[in-house]
Amino acid sequence: MTAPPKILAKENRGLLLDIVVFVLNIFLMQRLTSDVIDLFSLVSAEEPAAQFLISVGALSMWFLPAAGAVLKRWHFHQRLKHENRTFEWDAGAAGCLFNPILYFCMNLVLVSAIMPASVHFCLVSELSKMEPSLCQ
């Protein structure tokens, strides 16, 4: 019989993080879901702060994956150099998650949400100040 893994050991940090995130999701998901529903109801009521918050969220979903990939890539290559290995694309990393078409389509969807929101903030709000009858 093997001994149970030491959950706080350095090599098990990923497992510990997964467990913490899972437990937090169990307790916070109901609260966060109701907050998001309230946020979307405020967007439907044309509340400018809520619209701005949704736009910032969409812009973050568009920008942060690319930024994270760039920041992580340096550490990845440093680790490979330290282990005297090289990265080969044919070594099993060419699954659907690493398919560039998936990320291209995701970016198209996100940009289709970002552009109308930015046009609304930049143009419609300025037009309504100049001529309120144009924006109704």
Image: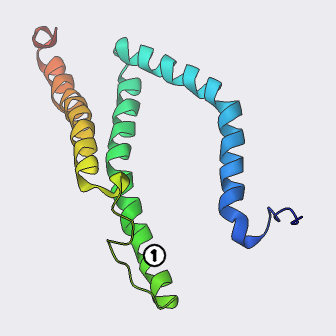
Residue at (85%, 62%) from the top-left corner? 4
Pick the quarter of the image with the N terminus.
bottom right
Task: Identify the residue at the far front of this view.
Answer: 1
> The residue under label 1 is which amino acid type?
Phe
Display coloring: rainbow
Left or right side of 48 for 114: left
Left or right side of 131 for 26: right
| In the depicted structure, whether residue 95 falls above or below residue 55 | below
Residue at (44%, 87%) from the top-left corner? 85
Picture coordinates of residue 133, whole percent (x, y):
12, 8
Choose top left, top right, bottom left or bottom right for residue 74: bottom left
- Name the residue beneath numbered marker 1: 76
Picture coordinates of residue 114, whole percent (x, y):
25, 36
Picture coordinates of residue 53, whole percent (x, y):
41, 32
| In the depicted structure, whether residue 81 falls above or below residue 131 | below
Callout 1: few (<14), some (14-19), or many (20+) C-alpha neighbours within 10 Å? few
Left or right side of 104 for 92: right
Pick the quarter of the image with the C terminus.
top left
Residue at (45%, 75%) from the top-left corner? 76
The kind of secondary structure element at disc 1 is helix
Choose top left, top right, bottom left or bottom right for residue 94: bottom left
| In the depicted structure, whether residue 38 falls above or below residue 15 | above
Q: Nearer the viewer, residue 134 or 45?
A: 45
Picture coordinates of residue 89, whole percent (x, y):
32, 72
Q: Nearer the viewer, residue 111 or 89?
A: 89
| In the depicted structure, whether residue 88 falls above or below residue 7 | below
